[in-house]
Image (cartoon, rainbow, N blue to C red):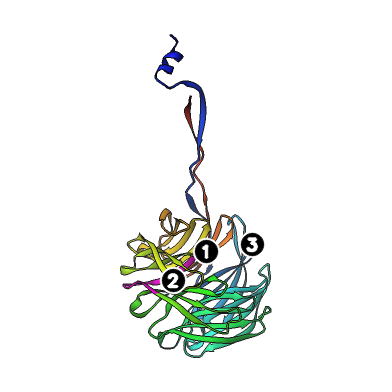
Amino acid sequence: MTSRETNRLSGVTFGLVLPVILLFAPPAHAQQVQSLEHDPLDARHSSLVQVDADTLALAYGGDGGDGYIKTFTVSADGSSITQVQVLEHDTLLGSYSSLVQVDADTFALAYAGDGGGGRIKTFTVSADGSSITQIQLLEHDAFSGAYNSLVQVDADTYALAYRGLANDGYIKTFTISADGSSITQVQSLEHDGFLGVYNSLVQVDADTYALAYTGDGNDGYIKTFTIPADGSSITQVQSLEHDPGVGIYNSLVQVDANTYALAYGGVDNAGYIKTFTISADGSSITQVESLEHDPSLGLDNSFVRVDADTYALAYRGLGDDGYLRTFTISADGLSITQVESLEHDTILAVEHSLVQVDADTYALAYGGEDTDGYIKTFTISGVGGLPVELMGFAVE
């Protein structure tokens, strides 16, 4: 009897040896590429946006608290960061910046100006960043305009969440022309009569918006609002107090059609990621999952989406050092998994603004040592997981 026949008696025949390829999803890998100290004096409340493929615009509070806009060119691989132009747009105060793109070369900035009043300004910024020109100014609140979060509603309408008079929470709408020549306040809603700080406003669908903010007692809240395309009305729909202890330094991002993820500082300033489902009409807000990713410190959060299930978080961690962490979050929000952590600044890192430059390159603006202004680039990609070939046996 042959060995092959003997194997048949056991019911298993070992035939040709076939390779079996097992593909493992590579982890999200973060690596610092380049660093530029763009302001050796001060940089507070940075807001960084992309102008075109290799140009970025930054609004921040600089020396003496004055308001600045700067442009930078950043190569697709992040290997070079070059300051191109600078405009000191406010010589008295320019804090709590929130900068958004209006059209190809027009940008709108919400900030706190002289005396802390709320202002909206428009600028034209050339595609190569070589020119920055202030166009228009509207002082929409003479008393207070801090903790700004400005988002686009439609082609010429914008919504702003901010802290107004007596620290109360406000939402306002504005129409801003494509060329930035006109800024008109349309509507205003005082949605919280106790407190409205650390605002992060995102669009849910065509007329629904979600706001993560810090309310009465420094508790963490999520609220939804309906705002029509013309901004003519602002209606609060639903409210969820998701953290009755502490909910500060909020950064809210969309995961899928009805799932959202929030990075924030919780009790004892620990770093948390939470997921929520929010219905398209805003009528329901449900907490799904929670992860305490840093029990020591998790403040000054800037949270962005990398791909379908990967997210990157820049924040101030233990010792006030600068950290960049990646997470995978399932589409339904049921799982939140930390993938990797990079401590990129061992001295100081405050008030972050993280944006995507290209498919795997990201730029971070923040206040570093002595709150000087820094821009850093990072690659965040699926690196380090090659196919693994195992030898198997065909079974008849």
Residue 61 seen in this snapshot:
no
Mark toward the viewer: 3 or 2: 2
- Amino acid type for the residue under numbered disc 2: Ser
Q: Residues within 10 Å of mark 1 (few under 14, many from 20)?
A: some
> Which of the two labelled residues, at mark 3 and mark 1, occupies the earlier sequence position?
3
> Which of the two labelled residues, at mark 1 and mark 2, occupies the earlier sequence position?
1
Q: Which residue is mark 2?
A: 284
User: How far apart are the alpha carbons under marks 1 and 2?
Assistant: 14 Å
Q: Is residue 74 left or right of residue 239?
A: right
Mark toward the viewer: 3 or 1: 1
Magenta-colored span: 240-256
Q: Is residue 113 magenta?
A: no
- Amino acid type for the residue under numbered disc 1: Ala
Q: Which residue is mark 1?
A: 257
Residue 262 at what x, y percent from top left? 43, 66
- Amino acid type for the residue under numbered disc 3: Asp
Residue 343 at what x, y percent from top left? 42, 57
Main secondary-structure element of the magenta-colored stretch:
strand
Give the residue drawn at x 43%, y 17%. 8
Q: Which residue is mark 3?
A: 54
**Residue closer to the observer: 36 or 120:** 120
In the image, farthest residue toward the top: 1
**Residue closer to the observer: 216 or 302:** 216
Give the residue drawn at x 50%, y 91%. 142
